[in-house]
Image: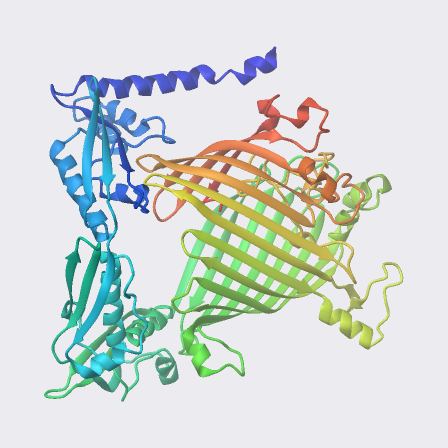
Amino acid sequence: MSRKREKYRYLPYVCLSAAALLVCSCSVTRDLPEGSYLLDDVKVVADGKYCDISTSQLKGYVRQKGNSRWFSAVKLPLGVYALAGKDSSWVNRTLRQMGEAPVIYDSVQAQMTCKDLQQALQNKGYLDAQVELYTDQKKHKLDAVYVLHPGQPYFVRELEYEIEDTTVARLMKHRRSLLHPGMQFSVETLSAERNQMTQHLQNNGYFRFHKEYITYAAQKDEQQHGVNLKLRLQQQHKVYLIDDIAYESSGEEQRLHLRPKVLSENTFLEAGGPYSAEKLQNTYNHFGRLGAVKYTNIAFEQQPDTTLLNAKIQIQTNKPSTISFQPEGTNTAGDFGAAASLTYQNRNLFRGSETFSLQLRGAYEAIKGLEGYSHRNFTEYSVETRLSFPRFIMPFLSRSFRRRTLATSDLSLIYDTQDRPEFHRRVLTAGWSYQWKPQNHHDSYRFDLVNLNYVFMPWISETFKKEYLDNETNYNAILRYNYEDLFIMRMGFGYAYNNGHVALKANVETAGNLLNISSKLLNASKNSETGQYTLFNIAYAQYVKGDFDYTQELMRGTNDQLVFHIGVGLAYPYGNSTVLPFEKRYFSGGANSVRGWTVRSLGPGRYKDKDGRINFITQTGDMKLDLNAEYRTKLFWKFNGALFVDAGNIWTFRDYNGQEGGRFTFSRLLSDLAVSYGMGVRLNFDYFILRFDLGMKAVNPAFEIESDDHYPLLHPRLSRDLAFHFAVGMPF
């Protein structure tokens, strides 16, 4: 009975809030002037077998749209607006700003919409298109339906070019045109062809050419539903050459603090060569990514009575050195503390826009709930230094490849000391990596040439050793492995693609192979107890790991969006290792995974929580699967909402003591999948997003299928099945 009360405890409040907003929104219609109507719904529909266009795209031409709806159902913004009183108090002004004013139907705007839709259809080749408006009045509300009659599309029958300048005409023959006889007539294609021609000419020396020089003449043939098209390019045009390129400082200092070679490497304009708009933009892009450069301006001056240009590149540089201090609060599983970091940065170390940074960080946490330990606090000190070059530092790369890509080479060195009541840990990390992105592409790449990670455990408390590491009843290979000295030497490669609608990430890394080959060639001895090769008497890790993430926008409207995401991760220890290092293992649950579970509280497989104190170790795996679908919508003001369904879990490839039921098998894949659902609220401040998600378990693989607890969707319990998440940014 108590469960039933808990389940429906918040239902009256939800119903009351919804009813209040509904009443407020209804009050809007009562206050409308006589003869006015609230525009309730707007539809765009099409008839005719020749219509192959999307009506959802044409909705952008509708001048008046109904008030936005919460998840396409409830007009929440209108309800918020209606809560405001009639006076101009601060509260009422705020409610009006956060909400949305009622949209009153305007017949003049509706007729203009009909003309806009007709013009849009004609621009797509439906030259005989007509648009009708139908309205449906219900008391003080009105629905508007725009019916499109596109008719039969027109096609280009004859295509003729009329170009007076013979040099330009020859140049146009060596490009791929968007126009051809037989294509459906389209104003958008004509405009794209004109822009492409203009760009082509501007990239080949035609400095003063603009698209207005290109015109079209079209003759309509109604009987054949065809168009005779003529492209005209009149006048003679001149090719301009760059005679000289000069650099100067536009800041307070007259001296430009960049090496001449750096200036020339980032300049794509060539003295003695023709002007090129593409090379001009590439020059801007390359100078803009230099940390030492604050502002760049490129001006051209024509020499009198010639077609020669002098290019002047004005560069304003940033202050080379900065020092910053950043305090922060910490909260680790309820243990509160504080941290602070001091960072020095030099953006032009060798006068080539190399960025050098040195960070000193310290942290302290008061740990509670630990019994039998002499110390109760956690302290951490770290030193991190990085040196970043805005180019490839690698031999045997051609100059053309270097100039086609935006590249960065990074060198890093980090030393971190952690003192906990249970143990002391020292971590030394060093790495050399490359990141690059081809110009005007959606792709980016990362290559970790070498990454060294040395973990040293100088002290482990006797209490911790006795209770966990040496206790055979609680023996766990993963637990023991993560409290031993370890050396990792890895190499990795990553690829990312993002065009705004589809995002893909793939990463692969491997560790220990070079060391293992060297050990075998040198006939090195193995540790007699563990059977592992060692380096400086420390066992090194050997594994391969791959990650794949794919996100696609399945639907996008004016205020709505449906997004699908899949994430797969596989990591396998072999050779010199039987267990993955803790930092390389997967976990599930949390704000970016299966949101019905808190972070690191799901899996592996059917594993059930046994000891909350070491679950951060035991609830990890060698394999991960995430499936997510999220419907996002704009609510009002800065507030956005989301409904989501998540599924996934983690597994191990081997049977480990202490992780019973965690091994992956294909036969139990579906029954091992955890499923959750929920809703979220997001505050969108443009520069960043604050996210609040509330997830509920729907299927819990920790319980047997025959048990009611396996299906929290049918047998919910808030204290067990509800999880709240706060995060910055979107989950995927």
The percent position of residue 177, horizontal first and vertical second, equals: 29, 69
Residue at image point 35% right, 84% down: 260
Does any portion of residue 205 appear in the rendered image? no
The percent position of residue 651, horizontal first and vertical second, equals: 70, 45
Residue at image point 44% right, 39% down: 691
Does any portion of residue 572 appear in the rendered image? yes
| Foreground pick, 718 / 538 | 718
Q: Quadrant of residue 30?
A: top left
- Seen from this angle, which residue lies furthest top? 1
The percent position of residue 201, horizontal first and vertical second, equals: 24, 76
On screen, 507 above or below 391? above
- Seen from this angle, which residue lies furthest front? 223
Q: In this figure, which colouring scheme has been used for the structure?
A: rainbow
Residue at image point 23% right, 47% down: 121
Q: How many marks?
A: 0
Viewport quadrant of the N terminus: top right
Is 333 on the left-hand or right-hand side of 555? right
Q: Quadrant of residue 499?
A: bottom left
Is 278 on the left-hand or right-hand side of 371? left
The percent position of residue 191, horizontal first and vertical second, equals: 23, 61
| Foreground pick, 711 / 356 | 711
- Seen from this angle, which residue lies furthest right? 528
Q: Quadrant of residue 613?
A: top right
Is 630 on the left-hand or right-hand side of 723? left
Residue at image point 16% right, 61% down: 218
